[in-house]
Amino acid sequence: MDIIDKLIRDHHLSREEYIRLLALAEDPSATERLKEEACRLRRRYYKDKVYTRGLIEFTNYCKNDCYYCGIRRGNANARRYRLTKGAILDCCKNGYGLGFRTFVLQGGEDAYFTDARLADIVRSIKAGYPDCAVTLSVGERSYESYARLREAGADRYLLRHETASEGHYGRLHPPQMRLADRKACLYHLKELGYQVGAGFMVGSPGQTDQDIAEDLLFLKELGPQMVGIGPFIPHHDTRFAKEAPGSVELTLFLLSVIRIMLPKVLLPATTALGTLDPKGREKGLEAGANVVMPNLSPVEDRKKYDLYDHKICTGEEAAECRACLARRVEAVGYRIAEERGDART
Ligand code: 5AD
Ligand code: FES
């Protein structure tokens, strides 16, 4: 039986089979079949709904030094900022009025945001907007810390694993950072009842098809509710400044594969995809994605959350992005749903 039929039938493949599947990434008929099946599954569970998440990038201080990232600690050129609780609540207020029912608090690993401070912010958001979900995306923390934040009301947690291959992880991160820690965090979050998001960059320096096969195996093992993938994009102040960006086509291919592997997954068409291709997010939806994550951060700070070069939407107000995305989503036959958008179980 052909490898694509097998994926469609079993929703999973072996390591060797994933590697064989990846060899088809540039084959238009393979891509088309995967896309069709991905859209069929997405429609079965989510109809034509696309969920929006209001992204609040609330601090770009970070104690880590991930080699690919523009806000890594070692980048002395990064202009640092952190939002006050009041500023974060203002973003939520603005976002709520625009129809957002999920707020994603994303930031670097910033020691200023102790458990007590973060829990207080989460509690205030949940008190002010009880019909909204709060998603945290603040990196690796202890089990106890994740437990406190969950108790404070956080519903979901995004922590991309970045790459599930030991050797490749070591090429992207300093030795203090360990893939095993990252994976342990994801399992802790799951155990604590968070809806969990993992994910990886496509085309990060040194990535091979073998590495991507590891990512897919890991996703199947973890069974996350959300998966964030986007192309790697070089940042000028990193050692990878001169590296080639990841491929839009491969990212789209993988979005379809992940939709088929995890049919009910919440899968964003990411900003990185929209950055590399003006129609990237629309193409992402057509490949099987069902989430968009426009930015709610104050415009004066947007440019400073500078993970990679040429990031889009750094000059637009939240309302402009909301309207722009509604147009884009509708242009490809979907509609934005003003709901929390929890994963189907
Ligand atoms: N290119 C693309 N994505 C990046 N991220 C960080 N740096 C880059 C880059 N240079 C992604 C990581 C991280 C998420 C918040 O942004 O996957 O988890
Ligand atoms: Fe931000 Fe289009 S989504 S301007």
Image (cartoon, grey):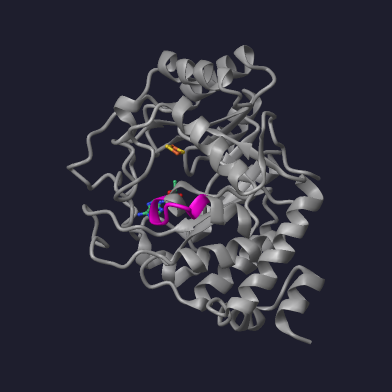
Q: Residue 205 location in percent, x, y?
A: 36, 68
Left or right of 31, for residue 206: left
Q: Position of residue 17 (x, y in %)?
A: 66, 82
Tell me the quarter of the image containing the C terminus.
top right
For residue 166, side relative to residue 37 (left or right): left
User: Can residue 39 be seen from the camera position used here?
Assistant: yes
Spot occupied by residue 106 in the image (x, y as percentages of width and height): 46, 35
Look at 56% across and 22% down and name the residue there. Answer: 98
Residue 231 magenta-drawn? no
Q: Quadrant of the N terminus?
A: bottom right
Can the viewer see residue 263? no
Q: Position of residue 189 (x, y in %)?
A: 63, 43
As drawn, 277 above or below 19? above
Residue occupying the point 69% across, 72% down: 33
> Based on the displayed image, in which of its 4 quarters is residue 199 positioned?
bottom right
Q: Which residue is at the far front?
A: 331
Q: Is residue 300 above or below residue 308?
A: above
Q: Nearer the viewer, residue 285 or 170?
A: 285
The magenta stretch is 275-281
Q: Give the residue drawn at x 65%, y 56%.
A: 288
Number of disc labels: 0
- Residue 12 or residue 97, whichever sits in front: 97
Can you name the residue that lies furthest to the left here? Answer: 77
Query: 106 or 39: nearer the eye?
Result: 39
Left or right: 242 in relation to 268: left
The residue closer to the viewer here, 257 or 338, is 338
The quarter of the displayed image where residue 196 is located:
top right
